[in-house]
Image: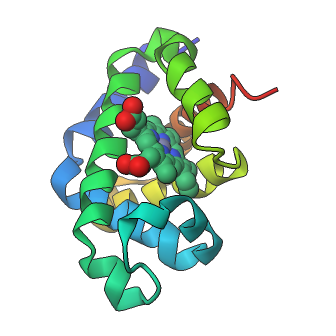
Amino acid sequence: KWTDKERSTINAVWDKVDIDEIGPQVLARVLIVYPWTERYFGSFGDIFTVTAVLNNPKVAAHGKVVLKELGKAVKNMDNIKGTYASLSQLHNEKLHVDPDSFRLLADCITISVACKLRSALDPQVQATWQKFLSAVVEAMSSQYY
Ligand code: ZNH
């Protein structure tokens, strides 16, 4: 499914991603750009203004959890679906996260990565990176029925 070139590209991008930096940024972006996603984070306290989102330690911590989890897909590129089967089920049955929001999160990941990598995220690299994220989105949606 993945060519050697795609594998090395994805690994090269991931190597440049600092989870502690990008993770908090990504989840804050999701909450600010798509404010209806706040509904899933009722236990996170004040996330009702841009400043509150950017300074909320639970948002930052959870962003790191999500990005760290993404690392598992990088390490298991040939079985992304299996890697996320139980997590998909959790998001469906317990967290009731609308699967459309996986796409929104993926787009925010790409934008945060682009801000970081700048010209290194050239069109071809971007295409490969987004193909990888699409596989993640598909896997996270696989247990919805
Ligand atoms: Zn999620 C949780 C991952 C997306 C929402 N997450 C979670 C966790 C993890 C994850 C790992 C933990 C689990 C346990 O604990 O067991 N996510 C993830 C991933 C993704 C996601 C990988 C993609 C890619 N999420 C998401 C979205 C949303 C969410 C999009 C919405 C918007 N999550 C969530 C919540 C939770 C989670 C709400 C819970 C949190 C707490 O802490 O409470």
Determine the image quadrant of residue 36.
Answer: bottom right
Q: Residue at x 30, y 43 (%)?
A: 65
Q: Position of residue 99 (x, y in %)?
A: 70, 44
Q: Nearer the viewer, residue 113 or 49?
A: 49
Q: Position of residue 51 (x, y in %)?
A: 33, 90
Determine the image quadrant of residue 75.
Answer: top left
Vertically, is 43 above or below 10? below
Q: Residue at x 46, y 16 (%)?
A: 83
Q: Is residue 37 left or right of residue 61?
A: right
Vertically, is 88 above or below 41? above
Q: Residue at x 66, y 35 (%)?
A: 92
Q: Is residue 105 visible?
A: yes
Q: Position of residue 66 (x, y in %)?
A: 37, 44
Vertically, is 32 above or below 130? below
Q: Position of residue 102 (x, y in %)?
A: 60, 47
Q: Residue at x 55, y 69 (%)?
A: 38
